[in-house]
Image: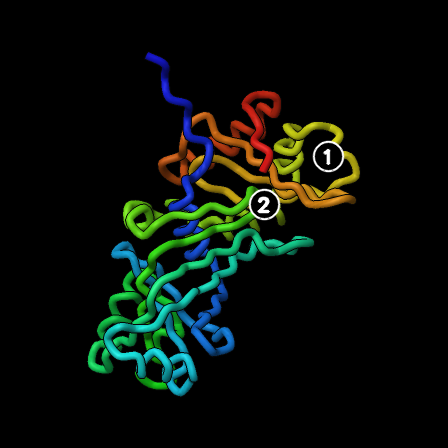
Amino acid sequence: MQEAAPLVAPNTAERVHSACAHAESAQLALPGLDPAPTSVHFLRQCGDIVIAVPTHSAAAGLVTGCGAPGSPAVLELTDHAPLPLREPVRALVWLRGWVHAVPGHAQRALATAVAEDHPHPSLLDVGHTSTLLRLVIDSAVVADNSGADSVCRDQLRGARPDPFVALEGAWLQHLHADHADVIDRLARRLPPTMRRGALIHPLAIDRYGVTLRVEAVDADHDVRIPFPCPADDIESLSRAVQALARNPFRGGLERI
């Protein structure tokens, strides 16, 4: 029996979860209204995303007025790289479904439940200047330099974000600020023609590998360098990065 090929990247549902966790901004699109910014967005395992909008906004009024059926909606989330790149957007996510009002008596209880996993300071405004809504997701699309892929709600329910999602930004900033030598050794895995005259930055780290952003004269290119096997904890992740840097001529590349 032929052995299965090793996983070298997160699947689409995992990418959606991680991009939502990274995203600092989101816009809620409702019929007949301009897109409304949200102050909180949290994708839950049950297949919905909890969002906060200003209490007296047109978005809150429309959804509340729809009653139990809710309103069709699309939430667009933007995942920005934590480094000063020429093109800072790493990924866009569109979550399509039906948005529902959360009853007034349940607002604080839901905010408390969300805060256990996502302690965002804007949750303190719930019940005062902001109100929570629930977008029940039918489908999701994630787009980055590798293209666009879609998943359904059941696939999202069965997925989790990358286990290092909360640490990734600090790791990338640390590499960028203090370990130019590591980035240089990782960059030696790239074809010489791609490196020539280009600025190279660490774009992403997850349990499956490292992605480099190559800012060339003509365009930006993202190249993924997979680990030999997925990392399970911080120690194994650190060892995997160090091993790639020590041995720049082992392992394959995945052009994104």
Looking at this rendering, what residue extends furthest in the left direction? 105
Q: Amino acid at mark 2?
A: Asn
Residue 116, percent across and down? 28, 63
Which residue is rendered at x = 55% and y = 48% of the image? 144
Q: Secondary structure at mark 2?
A: loop
Which residue is rendered at x = 72% and y = 45% of the image? 219
**Residue beneath disc 2:** 145
Q: Is residue 225 above or below residue 249?
A: below
* Circle count: 2
Q: Which image quadrant: the N terminus? A: top left
Which residue is rendered at x = 54% and y = 23% of the image? 251
Q: Amino acid at mark 1?
A: Arg
User: Badge 1, how many Cα within 10 Å: few under 14, some, many 20+?
Assistant: some
Question: Which label lies toward us, 2 or 1?
Answer: 2
Residue 217, percent across and down? 78, 44
Q: Which mark is residue 212?
A: none
Q: Which image quadrant: the C terminus? A: top right
Looking at this rendering, what residue extends furthest in the top direction? 1
Q: Is residue 255 above or below residue 137?
A: above
Residue 32, percent across and down? 47, 78
Residue 6, percent across and down? 41, 25
Q: Secondary structure at mark 1?
A: helix
222 and 186: which is toward the camera: 222
**Residue beneath disc 1:** 195
134 and 65: which is toward the camera: 65
Which residue is rendered at x = 68% and y = 45% of the image? 220
Q: Earlier in the sequence, mark 2 or mark 1?
A: 2
Q: CA distance from mark 2 to mark 1?
A: 18 Å
79 lies left or right of 109: right
